[in-house]
Image: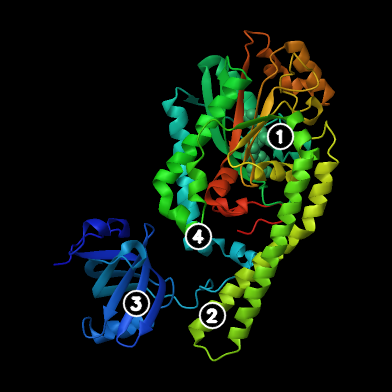
Amino acid sequence: MPKSSKTYISELKDNVGGEVVLCGWVYNSRSSGKIQFLIIRDGTGLCQCIAEKGKVPDELFEQLKHLGQESSLTVTGAVRADERSVGGYELAVTDAKVIQEASDYPITPKSHGVDFLLKNRHLHLRSQRQWCIGRIRHSVIDAIRRFFNDNGFTLIDTPIFTAMAAEGEQTLFEADYFGSSMHLTQTGQLYLEAAAASFGKVYCFGPTFRAEKSKTRRHLTEFWMVEPEVAFIDLDGLLELAENFVAFIAAETLRSNKSELEGLGADISALEKMKPPFYRLTYSEAVDILTGEKTKIFLDEQLKELQEQKQQLETKIAGLEEKQGSQLKQWQRDKIAAELIELQAELAETNTKIENNPKHAKLAAEFQWGKDLGGSDETIISQMHDKPVFVTHYPREAKAFYMKTDRNDDRVVLNFDLLAPAGFGEIIGGSVREDDYDLLLGRIKEQGLNTENYEWYLDLRKYGSVPHGGFGLGVERTVAWLAGEKHIRQCIAFPRLMDKVYI
Ligand code: 4AD
Ligand code: MG
């Protein structure tokens, strides 16, 4: 007898030999005369359901045969284990009920352009790729919360409307707050510093906003950031906290989402290495690397590899184009077309990298001490390492007003960025905070900020000022790095980009 309650695909392993009811959507289907193969997804996984003519009513068999992608239905059947099948289990269908028949679903198994997919994000979220990324993001966020909750941190929710600019006035989103000027928060940090003087160890976690005028793969205008802040901590303490934190997130994601990571083609063995200690470089050492011989050789090697890659891609594309000319079934034609779109995108990307290589080499070779590291500089340093790299002690001029000046060398501040490896780049920015009233006031003025808005922040340096610090980790960048996804816009369900908000 079929069970009356539904079973999730993730529970099939406990139901082998039994009869279950699955509720879901048609992900894919194919027919071979007397057998209909339906791949169903239900939010927990995929399952191939096999309907055989004669084993289900004729009318139902015909209906299933013509069922479009993303139609919703319930399927009843017997569970079999089958290693070759997607997810490892199959359903021998005995009955099914179509809930809604969908036709002409706009996103087909063929490849589509980025613009089209973003316009259809409400539907594209159902794709395997977005599903895997969404599950990984969920685990990353779960690990973030657990790490801080289990290590004595108190959650503080900081405001989204604020009059303060902590990360530069150029990237503020203005908001009209009943006639007075306000903006959307760039960081919860300044409020957290107040809270750290009450609770000791605190964190905030929420959406943050930056009117970044850059359309890079690393920038969103709305992104999620988690920020811990700790009273009585120095730079070494912060680095240790950050590496334990990132290693924990990587380990938890590997533990919970190995199959999703595999599905996305992420580098699992690289992730297994993400154990402390991470590499540590000072900014000055990073500059020496960028302008040194080692980087020149590294980039020359890289250029050679890219040129080889380009040739291989061109050969593959030519081969497939030739195949397209021969007699093929429609599904074979579709498959080749999809492969071609992907290879062509890869080729375009390789060409861009070939074009950029000499530009990046020049930028690196001519890097002047004093500037902030640019995207390409970060990429080079991170490509040269197999684990995350801390870069510390940046020049004061290049960084935010609240960072503490190094008392041993007042040209630099006690800060760090953490660069994820393999070319990914910055995922964390943090620092020890200036705790001296006069020095902090001087920095606020130096940056031309309105001191009135910072009076309460300065108060913290009047009443029991202590050495303290913290950092911020961007969720989308972290997910993109772990998932091996190039563009962070894929790592949030509904991305907000500089040039467009699609839906
Ligand atoms: O380095 P940022 O600007 O540091 C701060 O906001 C500090 N107040 C944090 C702190 O010390 N409490 O940003 C921190 C991180 C970056 O390393 C990056 O991961 C992410 O936030 N981030 C962005 N992610 C996506 N799109 C953007 N436009 C981002 N800007 C920063
Ligand atoms: Mg930063």
C-alpha gap between disc 4 and disc 3: 22 Å
User: 368 and 491: which one is in front?
Assistant: 368
Write down the residue under mark 1. Answer: 182
Q: Disc 3 on helix, strand or loop?
A: strand
Which circle's residue, 1 or 2, is located before the other in the chain? 1
Marks 3 and 2 sit apart, C-alpha to C-alpha, by 18 Å
- Establish if 261 lies above or below 79: above
Q: Secondary structure at mark 2?
A: helix
Q: Secondary structure at mark 1?
A: strand
Between 123 and 390, the one nearer to me in the picture: 390
Find disc 2 in the rendering and name its residue: 334
Callout 4, which amino acid?
Arg
User: What's the distance in space between the residues labelled 1 and 2, CA to CA?
Assistant: 52 Å
Looking at the image, which residue is at 86% across and 41% down? 366
The quarter in which the C terminus is drawn is bottom right
Relative to residue 90, is residue 144 drawn left or right? right
